[in-house]
Image (cartoon, rainbow, N blue to C red):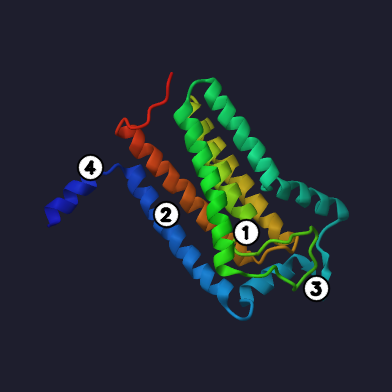
Amino acid sequence: MKSSVDTLLNRMEFPVLLAGLLIAAALWGFVELMEVARAAAPHAFDTEILLAFRHAGQPDDPLGPLWLQGAVRDITALGSSAVLVLITTATIIYMLLIRRPATALFMFVAVAGGQVLSSLLKLEVDRPRPDLVSHLVDETSLSFPSGHAMLSAVTYLTLGTLAARFLPDSRTKIFVLCLAVLVTVLVGTSRVYLGVHWPSDVLAGWCAGFAWAMLCWLVARLLQRRKVVADSE
């Protein structure tokens, strides 16, 4: 039994093994946060973090000058459906133009699948938006998980991994991947600052988005290794 396990581990590439472990950790985090979302009363860390973005005793008065509020609204727009659809469409068209249809299909499945999954999860948990502080933007959908956080993670991390394949050296690959993570973090944080999501909504969105993006990457890698999918040069 031990020898068979050792053989399996020897055959499995380290990036694949690491990706599997990260997916498991992200899913575990999402399940734990789902329990927080389903609780009758908001968790202490949710209320404390949400109020930390407001002046003490003034839940309708966000920290920072007026220009900061405008800047945060601009940042949160990077995770809006309109912007993500535009970016995804542009990427898909570019991949088709350079004759990489499998990569274009991968991008479409990753983002469209993430959108469907986000909508289903919102309906499953059915958590209302926070009413502890004022909302700086209008939102009408359910709160858990944060669609902006989840779809930003899916889209920008997928874009980052795709871009890294075409870059010449490790430094530029790391830069692009770090930039993708930074944008994802900023978008999620902006949702809490604007008062339209509990922090647990955003954390859950990051967990679900990261797990989905990594799962899509694993599937694409498996298909390419087995020659089921191959891009045209």
Mark nearest the camera among 4 and 3 is 4
The crowd level at tag 2 (other Cα within 10 Å; few <14, some 14-19, many 20+) is many
Q: CA distance from mark 1 to mark 2?
A: 18 Å
The residue at which mark 4 appears reads as: 11
Tell me the amino acid under the disc marked 4: Arg
The residue at which mark 3 appears reads as: 56
Image quarter where the N terminus lies is bottom left
Q: Which mark is residue 23?
A: 2
SS class, disc 4: helix
Q: CA distance from mark 2 to mark 3?
A: 38 Å
For the residues bearing labels 1 and 3, Cβ distance under 8 angstroms: no
Tell me the amino acid under the disc marked 3: Ala
How far across and how far down the image is residue 118, in percent? 56, 56
For the residues bearing labels 4 and 3, Cβ distance under 8 angstroms: no
Q: Which callout, 4 or 1, points at the residue further toward the start of the chain?
A: 4
Relative placement, left or right, of 155 versus 13 is: right
The crowd level at tag 4 (other Cα within 10 Å; few <14, some 14-19, many 20+) is few
Image quarter where the C terminus lies is top left
Q: Where 99 sits versus 43, above or below?
A: above
Relative placement, left or right, of 143 versus 206 is: right
Q: Which callout, 4 or 3, points at the residue further toward the start of the chain?
A: 4
How far across and how far down the image is residue 141, in percent? 68, 61
The residue at which mark 1 appears reads as: 146
* Residue closer to the observer: 111 or 158: 111
Tell me the amino acid under the disc marked 1: Ser
Question: Residue placed farthest to the right in the image?
Answer: 66
